[in-house]
């Protein structure tokens, strides 16, 4: 475990029934902030129409539009609504806002498969011992958690559009 830090970059993949693939990168770094970091090439694509299939990391100022994990006893976290294909957050052992990501997916052709590659986090980060991924229905209830393991791993099969959030 020597040399581990609170920094990592992971990837989620979405593959629809026709074999079309999309992905999103996310992680933690000591130099990252909440919001858009130009040095990490984060770009807001919330005004860009969704491709189908597509998966995005989302920031929301409140939960009136999307099922969003609420932080710090219901205090709104994000300064603006953003959709991102690359999302870096602050890193550290007590940085709550950096550890909870929300991903939204859109698709036309079901079933949709969700895969992950958590190799960087698993091999290099302190987060590897207690991180899991949850699949949420549009009502914000979640199904069985999936473990974040190294390598290319299957997480979920999504059968319809009612399950469209991952945290």
Image: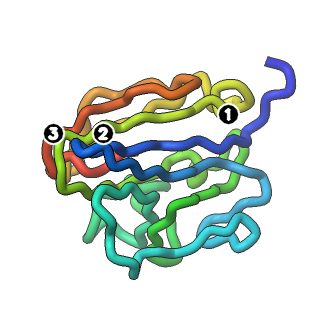
Would residue 107 be found to the left or right of residue 8 on screen? left
Whole-Å distance between the Cαs marked 3 and 1? Answer: 29 Å
| Front residue of this view, candidates 151 and 4 | 151
> Given contact means CB atoms under 8 Å apart, are the residues at marks 3 and 2 in contact?
no
Residue 127 visible in this rendered orientation of the protein = yes
Q: Element under label 3?
A: loop
**Which residue does the numbered mark 2 point to in the structure image?**
135
Question: Reading the chain from its start, which is encountered first: label 3 or label 2?
Answer: 2
| Front residue of this view, candidates 83 and 112 | 112
In which quadrant is the N terminus drawn? top right
**Which residue does the numbered mark 1 point to in the structure image?**
120
Q: Nearer the viewer, mark 3 or mark 2?
A: 3
Residue 76 visible in this rendered orientation of the protein = no
Would residue 132 be found to the left or right of residue 2 on screen? left
The residue sitting at 54% across, 43% down in the picture is 11
Local packing at callout 3 (Cα closer than 10 Å; few below 14, some 14-19, many 20+) is few
Q: Is residue 8 above or below residue 101?
A: above
Residue 134 image offset from top left, x and y in percent: 35, 37
The residue sitting at 24% across, 45% down in the picture is 18
The residue sitting at 64% across, 26% down in the picture is 122
How many callouts does the rendering have? 3
Q: Nearer the viewer, mark 2 or mark 1?
A: 1
Whole-Å distance between the Cαs marked 3 and 2? Answer: 12 Å
Q: Is residue 133 above or below residue 91?
A: above
Q: Quadrant of residue 115?
A: top left
Whole-Å distance between the Cαs marked 2 and 1? Answer: 22 Å
In which quadrant is the C terminus drawn? top left
Residue 143 image offset from top left, x and y in percent: 24, 33
Question: Reading the chain from its start, which is encountered first: label 2 or label 1?
Answer: 1
**Which residue does the numbered mark 3 point to in the structure image?**
159
> Given contact means CB atoms under 8 Å apart, are the residues at marks 3 and 1 in contact?
no
């Amino acid at each position: 475990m020597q040399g581990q830090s609170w920094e990592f970059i992971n990837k989620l993949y979405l593959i629809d029934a026709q074999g079309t693939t999309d992905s999103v990168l996310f992680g933690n770094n000591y130099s990252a902030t909440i919001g858009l970091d130009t040095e990490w090439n984060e770009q807001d694509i919330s005004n860009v129409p969704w491709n189908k299939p597509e998966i995005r990391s989302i920031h929301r100022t409140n939960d009136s539009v999307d099922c969003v994990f609420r932080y710090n006893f219901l205090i709104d976290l994000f300064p603006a609504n953003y959709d991102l294909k690359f999302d870096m957050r602050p890193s550290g052992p007590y940085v709550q806002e950096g550890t909870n990501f929300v991903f939204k997916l859109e698709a036309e052709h079901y079933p949709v498969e969700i895969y992950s590659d958590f190799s960087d986090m698993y091999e290099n980060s302190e987060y590897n011992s207690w991180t899991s991924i949850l699949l949420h229905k549009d009502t914000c209830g979640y199904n069985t958690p999936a473990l974040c393991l190294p390598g290319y791993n299957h997480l979920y099969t999504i059968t319809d559009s009612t399950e469209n959030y991952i945290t």
